[in-house]
């Protein structure tokens, strides 16, 4: 593994719009990624192993529930800080960011927002330290883009519920201690259920043979007559809007994260182009390579500014779901395009694990699909601007 020489691009001095606290948080996360992720990530991906030894470090840099209030173990930070942490983690690897964003936005957020005080006190502090890890079960084998069609269900048995069904493509499921699962009750209303590892009839088989997010553990959640205590139901919101509300928070984090992956590829390609000599001069001196690099920094800069603005709107509680969709969609496509161009700048070296580019490229093939596919986010924008629903 080569030394991590990453230098973040900031072409329009965006730093001047950040607070000292934002910059301190970023430096802590950036240094942690250089020290703890860069040296091990290539090996973890090649072996398709989740590097579980990093969990305490992720908790220490505040990556688990950055915006959850301090009284519940979170860091009490603003949304821009959350985004910056996701950017730095995904600069290292999308799978590491996935672990943190699932824990924060898809497990801690619903318990904080839709749970009662007992549930908040029981789970949140332990999730913040990584003592408990969680996952989020919405997608089913037959219901991906259309989660409202889910068939996983709970039946009221008087003093408890019985949960049946299956979820698939679930990040962190193979090692999660708890799962926030979305299931329909007898009236067809979607409810949030906290399922704990060890409950009889609950299993989490791992999904193997992925070419993408290889350092992230993905699996199923299978429920075979699982007895759920009544106190494990999230009481404060139900309906499809409840899980979709969590997705807004996670999609926002991904918008920042994708910029991190793009920055890493741009920085690698720029450095390589200055060092690689062909035809007697650095390849950076050829116009065709400059075109690639100039377009990359232009696209990164545009993404940085819509995302920072989205963070400001989110801090003011004014960001709409459609704005978040546009930002996630734009930034992931931007990052994926940059990985492809950067890979070419490195020539044959670009396909090796000596450099991070191909790993980012493969990871982003999942990022462009999960949390709503590229097409679904386009249709969300289409609906928002025309008023016409083209989903159904
Ligand atoms: P629709 O009728 O439009 O809406 C149903 C109810 O939900 C409300 N709503 C939202 N609420 C909060 N935030 C949003 N973004 C919302 N979007 C809609 C809506 O107002 C309505 O409320 P109510 O009170 O009237 O009932 O629902 P639909 O069935 O037509 O579906 C719309 C669609 C397609 C946009 C939506 O279902 C969708 O986003 N599909 C994509 C599915 C998806 O993103 N799945 C992600 C699974 S989790 C994951 O991938 C984690 S990866 C994590 C990692 O490793 O990082
Ligand atoms: P489908 O919904 O079958 O879509 C297939 C294609 O059809 C796509 O191109 C889609 O855009 C298109 N399509 C679908 N509907 C329409 C339409 N109305 N109009 C036009 N085109 C349409 N889910 C979780 O719940 N929790 C997790 O932690 C989680 N982690 C994941 C981790 C990984 C590595 C991956 C790959 C997925 C994960 N997912 C998770 C699932 C993810 O959210 C789904 O894969 C995604 O929502 C798409 O669903 P699908 O794969 O079933 O594709």
Image: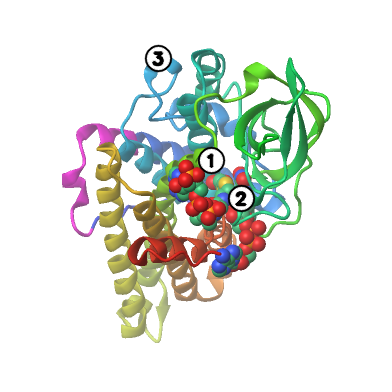
Q: Label 2, label 1: how many angstroms apart (C-alpha)?
A: 9 Å
Give whichever of discs 3 and 1 has the lower sequence position.
Answer: 3
Camera-side residue of 359 and 69: 69
Q: Dividing the picture into quarters, in which one does residue 302 lie?
A: bottom left
- Identify the mark at residue 151; answer none if there is no mark: none
Image region (quadrant) for ligand 2: bottom right
Q: Dividing the picture into quarters, in which one does residue 77 lie?
A: top left
Residue at x 28%, y 56% (from the top left corner): 306
Disc 2 crowd, CA 10 A, few/some/many (<14, 14-19, 20+)? some
Residue 208 appears left or right of 126: right
Residue 189 belongs to the span the image colors magenta: no
Quadrant into which the C terminus falls: bottom right
Q: Residue furthest bottom?
A: 279
> Depth-wise, is mark 3 or mark 1 nearer the camera?
1
Residue at x 79%, y 41% (from the top left corner): 205
Q: In this figure, which residue is indicated by the disc labeled 1?
A: 243
- Identify the mark at residue 71; answer none if there is no mark: 3
Query: SS class of the residue under badge 1?
Result: helix
The kind of secondary structure the magenta stretch mainly shows is helix
Give whichever of discs 2 and 1 has the lower sequence position.
Answer: 2
Q: In this figure, which residue is indicated by the disc labeled 2?
A: 147
Query: Magenta part of the protein: which range?
Result: 11-26
Regarding residue 36, the answer to whether it shows in the image is: no
- The image position of residue 53, as x and y in percent, is 61, 31
């Amino acid at each position: 593994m080569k030394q991590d020489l990453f230098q973040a691009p900031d072409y329009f001095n965006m730093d001047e719009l950040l607070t000292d606290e934002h910059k301190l948080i970023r430096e802590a996360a950036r240094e942690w990624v250089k020290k703890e992720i860069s040296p091990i990530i290539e090996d973890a991906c090649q072996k398709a192993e989740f590097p579980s030894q990093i969990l305490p470090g992720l908790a220490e840099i505040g990556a688990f529930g950055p915006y959850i209030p301090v009284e519940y173990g979170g860091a009490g930070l603003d949304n821009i800080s959350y985004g910056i942490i996701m950017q730095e983690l995904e600069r290292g690897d999308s799978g590491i960011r996935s672990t943190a964003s699932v824990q924060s936005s898809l497990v801690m957020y619903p318990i904080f927002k839709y749970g009662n005080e007992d549930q908040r006190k029981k789970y949140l502090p332990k999730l913040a330290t990584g003592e408990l890890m969680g996952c989020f079960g919405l997608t089913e084998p037959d219901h991906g883009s259309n989660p409202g069609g889910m068939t996983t269900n709970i039946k009221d048995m008087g003093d408890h519920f019985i949960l049946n069904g299956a979820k698939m493509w679930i990040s962190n499921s193979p090692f999660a201690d708890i799962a926030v699962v979305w299931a329909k009750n007898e009236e067809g209303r979607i409810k949030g259920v906290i399922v704990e590892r060890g409950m009889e009839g609950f299993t989490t088989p791992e999904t193997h043979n992925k070419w993408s997010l290889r350092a992230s553990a993905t699996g199923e959640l299978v429920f075979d007559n699982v007895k759920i205590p009544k106190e494990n139901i999230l009481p404060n919101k139900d309906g499809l809007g409840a899980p979709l509300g969590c997705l807004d928070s996670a999609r926002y984090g991904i918008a920042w994260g994708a910029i991190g992956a793009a920055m890493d590829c741009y920085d690698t390609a720029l450095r390589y182009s200055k060092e690689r000599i062909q035809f007697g001069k650095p390849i950076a001196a050829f116009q065709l390579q400059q075109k690639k690099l100039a377009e990359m920094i232009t696209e990164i800069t545009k993404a940085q500014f819509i995302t920072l603005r989205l963070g400001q709107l989110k801090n003011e509680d004014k960001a709409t779901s459609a704005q978040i969709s546009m930002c996630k969609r734009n930034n992931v496509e931007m990052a994926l395009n940059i990985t492809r161009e950067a890979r070419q700048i490195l020539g044959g070296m670009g396909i090796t694990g000596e450099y991070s580019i191909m790993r980012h490229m493969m990871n982003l093939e999942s990022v462009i699909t999960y949390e709503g596919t590229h097409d679904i986010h386009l249709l969300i924008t289409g609906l928002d601007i025309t008023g016409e629903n083209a989903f159904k």
